[in-house]
Amino acid sequence: MIARFSRPELEHIWSDANRYATWLEVELAACAAMEEEGTVPRGTAAAVRALAVGRLEPARIDAVERVTRHDVIAFLTHVEELAGEPARWLHLGMTSSDVLDSALALQTAAALDAILAGIAGLRAACARRAEEHRRTPMVGRSHGIHAEPTSAGLTFLRWYAELGRAAERVARARDGIRVGKLAGAVGTYAHVSPAVEARAFARLGLAAESVATQIVGRDRHAEVLGALALLGTAIEQIALGVRHWQRTEVGEAQEAFGKGQKGSSAMPHKKNPILSENLTGLARLLRSYAGAGLEDVALWHERDISHSSVERVVLPDATILADFMLARATTIVADLVVDKARMRENLELTRGLLHSEAILLALVRAGLPRQRAYELVQKSALAAHEGRGLFRELLGADAEIAERLTPAELDAGFSLEHHLRHVDAIYARVLGTTPGATA
């Protein structure tokens, strides 16, 4: 597992100590609910809580499990060692998955809450950079080729928006995973009533699985892993953007390079986008967990155990990995060194070719059929590409174009501000601010 990537909060959530403590909370909530129903003596849950909570020893449970070959039985054995006679009332009418699935729901939901906080931090960094570069002109690219002018801020704003959609998916998955069951061996409530389940889950903050088997439906877990996979892809979008910007031939932005940092063991001049490349690789790993989650959904009859070994690995790893990626991406965005002068230089690389559509549309408005206008503009553009003149001069020298457009009208087609005039409206749509306002 990738626990070495984890921050303290995630490390605690998936620790053995917290896992067993959460199991105990599920057992105590069920026990208290049974007390209210009258099937367990009053005060049992309080007695066990006083003797066992905070005293569980994961090493002792593991030692018992090596003999029993059953984790929940080992856990219950240890609780009985600590609490004595009152512990005999725990797990009454329950099956192991009642405890395991309900506790896993609580752990996963807590991990997703931490991830949602991480997404908010990364979005805040993107919003700050988007505002900083709201009107920083930059060449837009399609197919990797210069297209038309855009704003550097719009790239940060696009990342902000995509991360917002990722957050919505993670929040839905969190709500979908906050589901447990206390329905017994095959989900029929043979020995525990639905009322006990309802009372217990009110204490735990869980909903009950609508139609349980021995387990909660694993489509819920697959939804979590799918949401995390798409979050990883949103982070990869950022990483790919930075990697392109940092290419020597582009040079529009680069990861911060610390004092004493080295880029290559062989080439002292190198500054490599290593953090972004790292995120690109980790996104691949995070997406692979979604496939594992999908494989876990279809199980034999009321359940088999094939899913268990998978999710013991992928749920901690995927949430820990997503949390790590968010922290790293936030650092990249916050510290990114943006070269506005280089962006302006790159805008001029094609010496005006990126204004070709504006001239095309001006000719159409002047009465020329669109396909003929396209041919005329393309002719001058290809000549400029081949070094036979500047695009603006070639257009002005074309007699058919000169019949339709005055020199002033041609010049108007080369306005950079024309391309950015609706930037504020896009910001307002995404950030909910009035055009021109600070986000």
Image: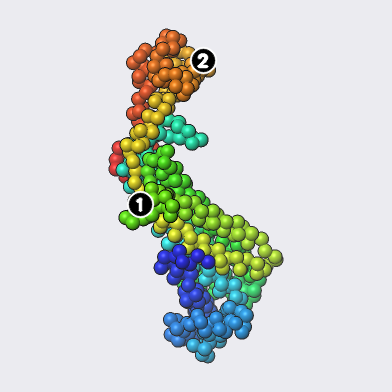
Q: From the viewer's perspective, is residue 337 above or below residue 353?
A: below
Q: Nearer the viewer, residue 76 or 404?
A: 404
The amino acid type of the residue labelled 2 equals: Arg
Give coordinates of residue 25: x percent, y percent: 48, 76
Q: Residues within 10 Å of mark 1 (few under 14, many from 20)?
A: some
Give coordinates of residue 345: x percent, y percent: 35, 33
Mark 2 or mark 1, earlier in chain: 1
Residue with the mark numbered 2: 372
Give coordinates of residue 183: x percent, y percent: 60, 72
Q: Residues within 10 Å of mark 2 (few under 14, many from 20)?
A: few
Q: Is residue 378 left or right of residue 70?
A: left
Q: Which mark is residue 420?
A: none
Q: Secondary structure at mark 1?
A: loop
For the residues labelled 2 and 1, the Cα–Cα distance comes to 51 Å
Q: Residue at the front extreme?
A: 266
Q: Residue at the bottom extreme?
A: 85
| Residue depicted at 64% across the width and 59% down the height | 295
Q: From the viewer's perspective, is residue 352 above or below residue 229?
A: above
| Residue depicted at 40% across the width and 14% down the height | 396
Q: Is residue 326 left or right of residue 194?
A: left
Q: From the viewer's perspective, is residue 163 above or below residue 145?
A: below
Q: Is residue 20 left or right of residue 7?
A: right
| Residue depicted at 43% across the width and 85% down the height | 50
Q: Nearer the viewer, residue 235 or 346?
A: 346
The amino acid type of the residue labelled 1 equals: Phe
Q: Nearer the viewer, residue 5 or 135?
A: 5
| Residue depicted at 41% across the width and 65% down the height | 7
Q: Are marks 2 and 1 in contact (CB under 8 Å)?
A: no
Q: Which mark is residue 257?
A: 1
Which quadrant of the structure image shows residue 6? bottom left
Q: Secondary structure at mark 2?
A: helix
